[in-house]
Amino acid sequence: MNELPVVFQYQKAFDEFRRGGGPAPLLKRMSELISLLDLTTTLNTPLSTDEILDAALLIVLGELQASRGCLFVRDEEGAFRRRASRGLPPRAPVLLADVALSGDGVLRRGEGEAWRPFEPLGLDAVCPIVKGGRTIALLGIGPRPDGRGLGPEEAGFLRSVAACAATPIENGLVYGELKHLNRRLSLKVFQLRNLFDISRELTASLDEEGIKNLVTATLMGHLMVSRCALYLDEPGGLTLGHQRGLRSGDVPALVPAEEAAPFLVNLRSSVPVRDLPQGPIRSALERSRLALVVPLSGPDRARGFLAVGERASGHAFSEEDCDFAQTLGRQALAALETVRLLGIQVEKQRQDREMQIAREIQQSLFPAQRPTVPGFDIAALSLPCQEVGGDYYDLIPLDEGRLALAVADVSGKGAPASILMGSVHASLRALAGSAPPDVLVARLNRFLYASTQANKYVTLFYAELDPGSRTLRYVNAGHVPPYRLGPAGRGRLEVGGPALGLLDEAQYAVGEETLEAGDVVAAVTDGVSEATNAADEELADEGVFRALQGSGDVTASDLLRGLVDSVQDWTGPRGCSDDLTALVLKACR
């Protein structure tokens, strides 16, 4: 079929008119040329795109004297969306997604499978508008009132219309795409500015509740929603950290860990609640009319999530909305973790200060200086395994030049043991010299039994030294038996009774030793005798006796230093596992 463009049809009609033909064909072609001129002028006017397309469609319908027509334009997804129409059936589709046209010829009613998408529109012909080999629009024309179909001249007119409209429509598509991209870019800039401002506020805030409030308020304002819930991953499960626009009980305060863990592992990006896997979490969010879940993304999995309700406008959340929400979620998580870490650091500093004060107080309980006792040399020290310990030693001057010596070990380690040790120190200082050693220890036992927990006890070696008679009267209350060695041999001081605080009416016996020149008595805690090496072997009694061996000129301080060095060499890099306390008493000439 001869579908010549209007210009060539006009030339042909003019030639026929000059050869004596009638004026009707020439006038028809001139009318079409005028319509094309009007169309071109309309397509280049500064109106909105829809107004231009609607006006252009009216020009074409007027020229062809058709009462029905439409113009579909390709959208970003590749489908054709109706942008202008006249006289279409009420249920005519707005979107054509499955159109297959080849070439740029006019497609007429009933021409094979290609006509199937246009059947509901009630058209007679469809002309593709092509630019650069790509169909960018579809011009549809319905039947004319006299029932005549489109002849070759009308088809040629449609092709001319398509040729004239191709460039303006393509320019409109490019302009529309640029406008859309510009809107997206403007939105991104706006979001980035918001995120930057919020980031500064989050960084400056040290209040966890303030951070939660800021994040939820910002997200609700940006997305224009009226409800929001913030959940954080805690040791017991997902905990409701903050809520807005929800009544108490609308959402669960806690999601158990066995339900929360798989949910958080699989929560990689923002997702509508309706797309979540079936389960208690989805059901709870749906009941609360929450529509979107945004993860608080950590390095390996989500550490919580934000859930927001639907928009009041009913519009869906865009990709930009989800990106903004997810970035805000990451910032919120970082700010909350920073505040928590700072809180842990502050708490640790506070505890360190308190422990330093406790250590200073504990050190003040030990004798500030060694007393001078004629005929004897004394040295003692205590090294806690932690900041403070439960070991204790004391040198208490008594009447008539006598001296009380005490070494104790409180059950446990650290601050609780040091508190009980302070109680022992005060009690022993108050009781020393007031009664014989066995009576004194029995009184101390009853006091500790009545004032301490059932699982707390104290081992004690208490002795009173009389320099004049060179005798040492002692009670060993469940303590490591002190070591005695000298020219006459070696032995242990074991006489006494049970540890203090275990039995209400415990009985104690008194032992007595006479010390000759060169004799050494070393009272230690089990941090010395039970010190272990890398092979878990204890230093034991033989190791302690070896460390205490020395010549006649060795002082008590030398013996003490040698004992401590032996323990530290034995334990090696692993260090101590218990407090180390030792008191060395050496009889001189």
Image (tube, helix red, strand yellow):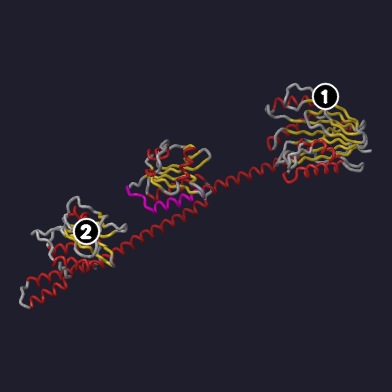
- Residue 509: which numbered mark, if any? 1
- Residue 80: which numbered mark, if any? none
| Spot occupied by residue 68 in the image (x, y as percentages of width and height) | 15, 57
Q: At 87% from the left edge and 28% from the top edge, which residue is drawn?
A: 512
Could you tell me if residue 429 is visible in this image? no
Exactly how many numbered labels are in the figure?
2
Question: Within 10 Å of the Cα at label 2, are there few (<14), some (14-19), or many (20+) other Cα atoms?
Answer: many
- Residue 84: which numbered mark, if any? 2
Above or below for 94 versus 368: below
Question: Within 10 Å of the Cα at label 1, are there few (<14), some (14-19), or many (20+) other Cα atoms?
Answer: some
Q: In this view, which residue lies farthest toward the bottom?
A: 18
**Mark 2 or mark 1, which is nearer to you?**
2
Q: Nearer the viewer, residue 400 or 299?
A: 299
Where residue 124 sits, quadrant-wise, is: bottom left
- 382 in the magenta segment: no
Which badge, 2 or 1, is on the more N-terminal residue? 2
Horizontal side of residue 281 vs 234, given as left or right: left
| Spot occupied by residue 470 in the image (x, y as percentages of width and height) | 91, 32
Look at the image and tell me in which quarter the C terminus lies.
top right
User: In the rendered structure, which amino acid carries the disc numbered 1?
Assistant: Ala
Could you tell me if residue 199 is visible in this image? yes
What predominant SS class does the magenta segment belong to? helix
Q: At 71% from the left edge and 32% from the top edge, which residue is drawn?
A: 411
Highlighted magenta segment, given as a residue range:
313-335
| Spot occupied by residue 27 in the image (x, y as percentages of width and height) | 9, 71
Whole-angstrom CA distance, mark 2 to mark 1, is: 114 Å
Q: Secondary structure at mark 1?
A: loop
Tags 2 and 1 touching, CB below 8 Å: no
Where residue 381 sits, quadrant-wise, is: top right
User: In the rendered structure, which amino acid carries the disc numbered 2?
Assistant: Ala
